Amino acid sequence: MFKKLDKESQLNLGSLEKFVNKKRLKLIKKLLKQKRIEIYQKSFNTTLTNGMRYPQVKAGEGIDADDVNKEIENEVKKQVYAEFSQNAFEKITESIAPNISGMEHIKKAAALQLFSKQPIHILLLGDPGTGKTDILRSAAELSPASSFGLGSGTSGAGLIVTVKGDEVIKGLLPKADQGLCAIDELNLMKKEDYAGLYNAMEKGFVTYDKAGKHFKFDARVKMLATANPKGDKFDGQNIGELKKEIPFDSALLSRFHLVFMIRKPDLEQFKEIAKSIISNEDNDVKKENINFIKGYIEHIQGQEDIDFPKEYQQQIIDFIEDIKKNEGNYLIDITPRFVVGVMRLCKALTRAEGRYEVEEEDIRKVKGIVRKSLKIS
């Protein structure tokens, strides 16, 4: 039996028009009049955007509304993501370890790392108790694919696989394939276990041999790691002394595109940090916002590749040349891998904001982050 639609039902039906085709809309109207379905309004679950209410179909017995609801949600997501893209870089930077005051340049680098389709490897090298681990955990939590492990508790086998009886389970590196692999206190990992790390960082796969069987797993990871200096604290007063306190040889250090040196804050800096904490105690990232960011990253990663206009490439060359002149003042060498990292960071910023071509402003922002990474504080 058909019944005339009440005003609310008419409004809800009208809200479906921009999401479904005429044929489907006609069927929905018929089912609605028969009282076999209901239409209700749902809100997008995040505080990171202005929000959007959109219609969903509540199906009665014998009716499947999953396809139409999914179609509507996908279309709404595109609209919400398009709005969010205008401030995505800033919003996601703010969502990385908001409990840690300062270190904005590191949070920006970690945010860009999440958006890069190609590997960008970042090392946070510094004194304990400075919040390095918080940044690591937070970034891994925001990445759609990620793994987190401790250098002290990660053996060569654990990096590549975990073996339980006859079962071979993917380890830390392949588990983070096409995502973020976060390793805390990398300096505590045994040198004999570096081989798997090198393979993943450079070649994008790892291998494991057991009982005559050969295993190969994709491990196209972006590495975000922390490490403490030798003796647990930087004591050096000049670049020569500081380099001697680095816990790695150049073979491992050179595989990172960016290396940030972090030292404990002095008294004045600590007072500012304390003020920030006291004035903003409730600064945890809400679960719904984490899920939204993950969804946004997945969405944006599915878009086409980024174009780097030739007229801007010369700016990168000039920038690298200027930095190279002062190479002796940095903890790391300025290598071709460093240049690759700068290019990828520019593309990542473009992608984060839903654009397809690198702009001059992207280069300016990335240059600022890179210079901060080279600074010896």
Image (cartoon, rainbow, N blue to C red):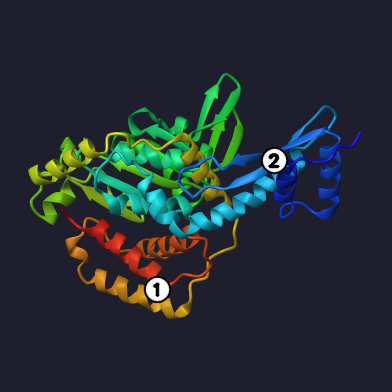
Looking at the image, which is closer to me, 216 or 44?
Answer: 44
Residue 258 point in image, percent of width and height: 33, 55
- Name above or below for residue 238 compared with residue 311: above
What is the three-letter code of the residue carrying label 1? Glu
Looking at the image, which is closer to me, 231 or 136?
Answer: 136
Looking at the image, which is closer to me, 327 or 111?
Answer: 111
Residue 259 point in image, percent of width and height: 29, 52
- Name above or below for residue 282 compared with residue 71: above
Residue on which disc 2 sits: 56
**Residue at 39% in and 60% down:** 341
**Residue at 47% in and 40% down:** 290
Q: Report the side of 89 relative to 5 (left or right).
A: left
What is the three-letter code of the residue carrying label 2? Gln
Looking at the image, which is closer to me, 17 or 166?
Answer: 17
Q: Report the side of 363 relative to 261 (left or right).
A: right
**Residue at 22% in and 50% down:** 261
Q: Residue 319: which disc?
A: none
Label 2 packing within 10 angstroms: few (<14), some (14-19), many (20+): many
Mark 2 secondary-structure assignment: strand
Residue on which disc 1 sits: 360
Q: Is the N terminus in the top left, top right, bottom left or bottom right quadrant? A: top right
Residue extending furthest toward the top: 165
Residue 307 point in image, percent of width and height: 52, 70
Q: Earlier in the sequence, mark 1 or mark 2?
A: 2
Residue 141 visible within the image: yes
Residue 205 point in image, percent of width and height: 53, 45
Residue 117 visible within the image: no
Can you tell which quarter of the image residue 209 is in? top right
